Image (tube, rainbow, N blue to C red):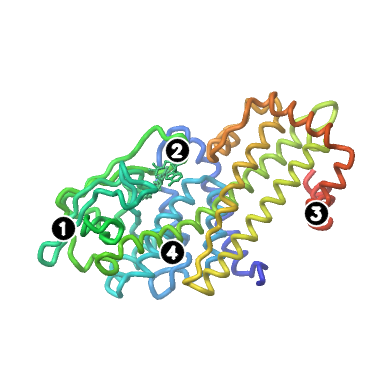
Amino acid sequence: MDFALTEEHRQVQKMVRDFAAKEVIPSVGEWDRKQEFNPNYLTRMGELGLLGISIPVRYGGQGFDYISLGLVCEELERADTHLRVVMSVHHGLNSQAVLQWGNEDQKQRFLVPQARGEKYAAFGLTEPNAGSDVAAMLSTARKVGDKYILNGEKMWISLASRAHHFLVIAKTDPSKGHEGMSAFLVTRDMPGVTTGDIHGKLGVRAGSTGWIKMEEVEVPVENRLGEEGEGFKIAMSCLDNGRFTVATGAVGLIRACLEESIKYAHERSTFGNPIGKHQLIKQKIALMQQWYDAAFLLCAKVGVRQGRLDEERGHPQHPRDRPRQVVRHRPQRAGRAGSRPTARRIRLQRRVPGRALPAQQQGRGDLRRHERDSPDYAGRLRAGLPQGQAAALRDACL
Ligand SMILES: Cc1cc2nc3c(=O)[nH]c(=O)nc-3n(C[C@H](O)[C@H](O)[C@H](O)COP(=O)(O)OP(=O)(O)OC[C@H]3O[C@@H](n4cnc5c(N)ncnc54)[C@H](O)[C@@H]3O)c2cc1C
């Protein structure tokens, strides 16, 4: 497989990187602090074509490949997780599902305006008492003539209070468990649909997360996605699409941590030198770069395969675990000063699960481990990295 980025990929990457640098990073910390969603980011993402980046041109999208979708997610998550979440739900969980499962009429009515960024889309699967255990959901869809009557409540739904369109899963035959579920395209203007926001989240605080309530909502049969009883299958395929965007976003989170770490390694001095001159810190930075490369390449492989073989979808769990490890190293490097990190560093730490132990404890433990294990330290470091990478990183980064 050839993972080299094409000129087209680089243009997409640069466009999103510029958007993030000029229009998001300077202000997003304030929105995160206020725990409010800035609708202008979403408008601009639509204007830039990001909301339909990998949807075919004939359905209003940009027609780029999955590698491009991955690059968009990486750059957005590097700026702030909530922008990548928008891509996950609007593009991955909703639009790609309509492309995959919808008929031509549904594609024209729902997919085209979504891909053009004129309408926003959400995905409603989770309920107050049904998360991982999807089949435990209580939402129902009762068929009456040429309509379904939907009742139920969806919880933890990204863009709940912003989206125009919702892809909702409900039970058409509760006696059949996961085989009795169906998928529906519900619109905000349907009588009986109400939404609200969830406040006080630990992470993704600039993001829009909320609930959708459906009370006797009449959904025309033309809005059923796929066949009756295919809801579980459709939901799982949506999650597959979403996973690719989450994984590629995680690559961006690793990069954000790496960049901040390198910056801090230059800023902070101990024993008369920037901490980046100490061998221990060099090793940590080199490992972070190694994880980034591994995660990036794994996602690229999935992107290539997803593009080639639609039915053979990847499950890039590996990169999702990486940010936790990257951040675990950061406060150790920061020492005591790390307990007073910048606002961006605080947000980066909050954006990944698994907090660090108090900085001094970890830092000391690390140094002891380093002393214990260090005689052939540089050699082992080189052995753990591709040829020449450790030396190149030492010279280039620090
Ligand atoms: C910011 C945010 C945005 C979200 N956006 C959306 C959205 O747009 N649409 C949507 O439908 N949902 C959304 N969700 C919901 C999310 O997908 C659910 O949180 C997820 O499905 C897990 O469900 P749960 O939180 O109910 O956890 P639970 O299912 O209650 O699980 C609790 C814990 O138990 C573990 N666990 C569960 N079952 C098992 C098992 N069999 N073996 C071992 N461990 C197990 C889980 O891994 C988890 O750690 C969002 C959530 C968040 C936080």
Asked if the residue at label 2 sits under 8 Å from ligand 1, the reply is no
- Compared with 383, 273 (above or below) is above
- Compared with 153, 11 (above or below) is below
Closer to the camera in the image, 296 or 361? 361
> What label sits on residue 205 in the rendered view?
2
* Other residues around mark 1 within 10 Å, as few (<14) / some (14–19) / many (≥20): some
* Residue type, label 3: Gln
Residue 201 spot, x, y in % from top left: 42, 35
Residue 247 spot, x, y in % from top left: 54, 54
Q: Identify the residue at image location x=16%, y=60%.
A: 148
For this orientation, the residue located farthest to the right is: 375
Spatial distance from mark 3 to mark 2, Cα to Cα? 37 Å
Residue 65 spot, x, y in % from top left: 53, 69
* Residue topped by disc 1: 142
Spatial distance from mark 3 to mark 1, Cα to Cα? 61 Å
* Residue topped by disc 3: 389
Give the tally of numbered discs.
4
* Residue type, label 1: Arg
Task: Choose the circle earlier in sequence order: 1 or 2.
Answer: 1
Residue 143 spot, x, y in % from top left: 14, 62
Mark 4 secondary-structure assignment: helix
Asked if the residue at label 1 sits under 8 Å from ligand 1, the reply is no
Mark 2 secondary-structure assignment: loop
> What label sits on residue 330 in the rendered view?
none
Asked if the residue at label 4 sits under 8 Å from ligand 1, the reply is no
Check if mark 1's residue and mark 4's residue have beta carbons within 8 Å.
no
Task: Choose the circle earlier in sequence order: 2 or 4.
Answer: 4
Q: Ligand 1 appears in which quadrant?
A: top left
Judge depth for marks 3 and 2 and give the one in front. 3
Q: Identify the residue at image location x=80%, y=43%.
A: 398
Task: Choose the circle earlier in sequence order: 3 or 1.
Answer: 1
